[in-house]
Image (cartoon, helix red, strand yellow):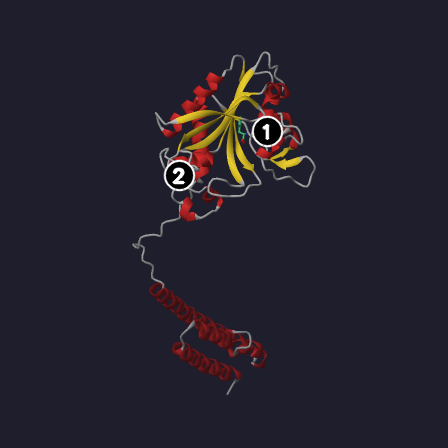
Amino acid sequence: MSEKNTLIQELETLQAKAEAKLASLSGEVALAKWKTEYLGKASPVMQVFKRLPEASKEERSQIGQFANQVKTVLEQSFELKAETARQATLAEALKSEQLDVTLPGRAPLNGRLHITTQTLREIYRIFAEMGFQIYRSPEVESDENNFELLNIPPHHPARDLWDTFFTKKEGVLLRTHTSPGQVRAKREFASEPIRVVLPGMCYRYEQTDASHEFQFNQVELLVVGKHITFANLKGTLQEFAERMYGKGVRTRIRPSYFPFVEPGAEMDVECFVCSGKGCPVCKQRGWLEILGCGMVHPVVLKNGGYDPKVYSGFAAGLGPERISMLRYHIDDIRNFWANDVRFLEQF
Ligand code: PHE
């Protein structure tokens, strides 16, 4: 038998064997193995090409051609089988990973503004309607701005009104109220007329209870100009209370002391819990304090760069958390910064 016949017979046997095996296979792993075995570099078909020199010159091209033909046939069979396998896998996946697009979706959690942010924005809106601008000032302040320039010298007993967080740096503290912003605003605008609200976080070294927190917001009001009177102060605050709580809300102004105003006063709103009868929330007083206020002290005007003989002004400091408590009947100020979503979600 000639080389040609031997090799061709081998190829024929091989092709038949390979086809038979391919037909019996399933699964992509088995298919990959088959491919290496019958079409890989070490496979008998490929080896035939290496053995071509064994054949006579005339036969080589015929054997080569035949081997190529076998290779192509096997490749085609393989592709066909592989495609069928891929389709089967896909069909399987589609069946097992079925997606019901008609199921209702899961509602995404909606974020919301913190109740204090909402109240602050409402306060800004009310005062903006009355012609006030927002003026921002820092929470970390100097002793000078927080106390001295507000007419509270070192060691003055009035400092006891504000339990203070001091920093390790001499003369630097966490502001105990927004009033130091007054100094900054006056020094920036002197001697133009001023009508600003100064909002932001304040800090006090407090024993916390239902109505005291060691961090809370304040909104300071400051008006400076010629002929500003106590009547302007009262009218502005009453107007604010009515826009905030509704027409006819009961308020009262009573004398009080703050070193940076003269005369000084506090404004109260009727207690929401007991309607003025007296209860633990209002400490039996029937009223809840919502702000401190007064006419800017001449010394403080002067420290801000305004001549107290020509200019006068009024200031007030309100507590947005207290204001929210009155509006929504919240009985413990500690809820605001406790970060309990069950509380926060209600607003
Ligand atoms: N700064 C004062 C406080 O925190 C409030 C206040 C502001 C009083 C402006 C008078 C005028 O207690």
Residue 68 in view (yes/no): yes
- The amino acid sitting under disc 1 is Pro
Q: Residue furthest left?
A: 102
Q: Which corner quadrant holds the C terminus?
A: top left
Task: Look at mark 1 in the image and give the residue it sits on.
Answer: 180
Residue at the image point whose x is 39% and y is 29% from the top = 244
Label 1 crowd bin: few (<14), some (14–19), many (20+), radius 10 Å? many
Residue 302 found in image quarter: top right
Return the x and y of residue 168 as percentages of the image width and height.
Answer: 68, 41
User: On the picture, is 17 further left or further right than 98?
Assistant: right
Query: Would the CB of label 1 be found within 8 Å of ligand 1?
Result: no
Residue at the image point whose x is 58% and y is 77% from the top = 50
Depth-wise, is mark 1 or mark 2 nearer the camera? Answer: 2
Q: How far is mark 1 from mark 2, CA to CA? A: 34 Å
Nearer to the camera, 131 or 273: 273
Return the x and y of residue 79 as percentages of the image width and height.
Answer: 43, 68
